[in-house]
Image (cartoon, grey):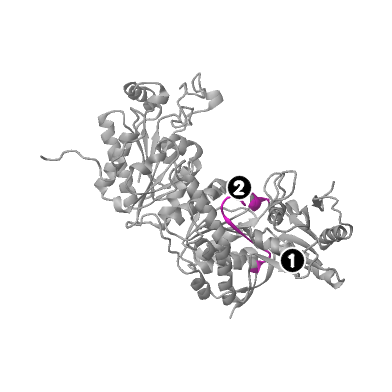
Amino acid sequence: MKKVFQRPEVLSDVVMHYCPGCTHGIIHRLVAEAIDELNIQDRLVGVASVGCSVFSYNYFECDMQQAAHGRAPAVATGIKRVHPNNIVFTYQGDGDLAAIGTAEMVHAAARGENITIIFVNNAIYGMTGGQMAPTTLLGQVTQTSPYGRNAETQGYPIKVCEMLATIEGTAYVERVSVDNVKNIMATKKAIKKAFQTQIDGKGFSLVEVLSTCPTNWGLSPVESLGWLRENMMPYYPLGIYKEK
Amino acid sequence: MAIRDRLSGNEAVAVAMKQINPDVVAAFPITPSTEVPQYFSSFVSDGKVDTEFVPVESEHSAMSACIGAQAAGARTITATSANGLALMWEMLYIAASSRLPVTLAVVNRALSGPINIHNDHSDSMGARDSGWIQLYGETNQEAYDNLIQAIRIGEHPDVMLPVMCCYDGFITSHAVENIELVEDEKVKEFVGDYKPEHYLNNAANPVAMGPLDLQNHYFEHKRQQAEAMKNAKKVILEIAAEYEKLTGRKYGLFEEYKMDDAEVAVVVINSTAGTAKYVVDQLREKGVKAGLIKIRVYRPFPVEEIAAALSKCKAVAVMDKADSFNAAGGPLFTDITSALYGRVDGVKVINYIYGLGGRDVKTDDIEVVYNELLEIVKTGQVKSVYNYLGVRE
């Protein structure tokens, strides 16, 4: 019988710890597929973040280093400078990348570090139980914004791709989503392009993936996908923000 | 032939780094350590080293990048002071527990607040239990020699721990002194190549660095870390013996100055030892049996050796250039008294906190300390254990 579907080689054969309906699993698979297709597994080093994706080293079959909260781009800088021919990526959520690790992310981009960042944005702190993140939308209810995020007291959600697009050091920045099949296919293409950017030595690449958190949003997985489309997409428009 | 030169402490350390030729230096400037990476960056620009120099945006990122680089199999060095070291705090523990022998020059400066750029030891004393080996140096020569030896100590397979080489801000870092440098090729031969057993992207031996380590293994890993620190004491002495063969300069866990028959002794760290040695000489001329111990290796702390060295003294003053705010005494005092406990009885030990925020410490001040010790010997009475020297109150 002809094999038409299989687990990507770089994805471990283990049960993931993510909640039902969480889109991390899809994104992990897309990253793994891109790596397989580019045939870079043997020279791949990943840096794990802190947050829901802390266990990514259990899921990717490559050398991984755990970074302290938010510091993955700085750790990746060290690895990449030692092994410039290796492919170095970080996999970070919005609590890790857009809050405590903003400086590391911005300055790795400003230095034009030839690394790839997969940035998963679900507009909330997932692992700690649903508190407001810098990416939380105005009006969005979380554990620490029970009446909805209020701009007067809690400021505005950070648009990472738009911010990075202004930085000379970035080579490729795109925002994608995994809310439907068409967008999932586009996400795969973007992740592959980000790794290709690094392979070609062009510099810093980041793919922001709009993602869901059914558990902390208090919605079913299907409702969550709808909420993402209706609320996140208008504020975080999909598209390529930088391409050198 | 050794090379005679005159250099500031920071220049000497930068020259040691040039001779070591590390794979990666990631750094962020902070007074008074700024010159170290700055001098070093000129060696990079002039093509005198093969180092990848990464000027990052903060000390936190400097240590993060060093950790990434060292994990990737590179020999890595950085430098910092005071609040820079404080910002590295989180990463200090991660470097130590990941058993990554990063080398760090700490140019001692008072830790804010209040903000102050001058010398005391409140920065590195705070990091004394971070799992790093701590070496202290009195002079430019010692700062230079310690850094070269630190590479071998940290990378030794029985140790595999990061090493901090501390020396006094401005007093040692900026003052120019005569120095004997080792020839480049001899330093290269002494430090050798960095060949870690495990490193990232070694296809033959895949690894995960620093993953989550819960109830089932965390404790065992910390226990191994503690054992490595114990092993370090022997390794430090072995490396020192090898270095002595190369340079003729002798290093131990601490320096004993006129301690053979000393009845009163001061224990001190870094540059103040130079001032205190002068006072010891003056007192000796008057027939006073005064001695001095200068700590070189503070972590691991040489408890048995210190206890033996102080066992014949009648009264000892431990001088701390940092306070502990424990309402009981400075960090060195606590360690010395606990080293003596159960090993040596009958030695009266007092503590002086001195020189905070760069307050000048003169020979007159040190004389006050020895006079108090002599008074204790004479009367057998300790008036006060926990004291301050040179403060207005």
Please, which residue is most extreme toward the left here? A1
Which region is colored magenta? B122-141
* Residue B156 versus residue B68 in the image, above or below: below
Q: Residue under label 2, please give it.
A: B86
Q: Residue B137: within the magenta? A: yes
Q: Is residue B201 left or right of residue B215?
A: left
Please, which residue is most extreme toward the right here? B379
Q: Chain of mark 2?
A: B
Q: Is residue A175 left or right of residue B389?
A: left
Which image quadrant: the N terminus of chain B?
bottom right
Residue B317 in sight from this viewpoint: yes
Of residue B196 and residue B316, the one placed in the foreground of this image is B316
Of residue B256 and residue B125, the one placed in the foreground of this image is B256
Q: Residue under label 1, please give it.
A: B274
Q: CA distance from mark 1 to mark 2?
A: 28 Å
Q: Amino acid at mark 2?
A: Ala
Place of residue A93 in the rendered image (x, y in percent of width and height, measured from the top left): 42, 36
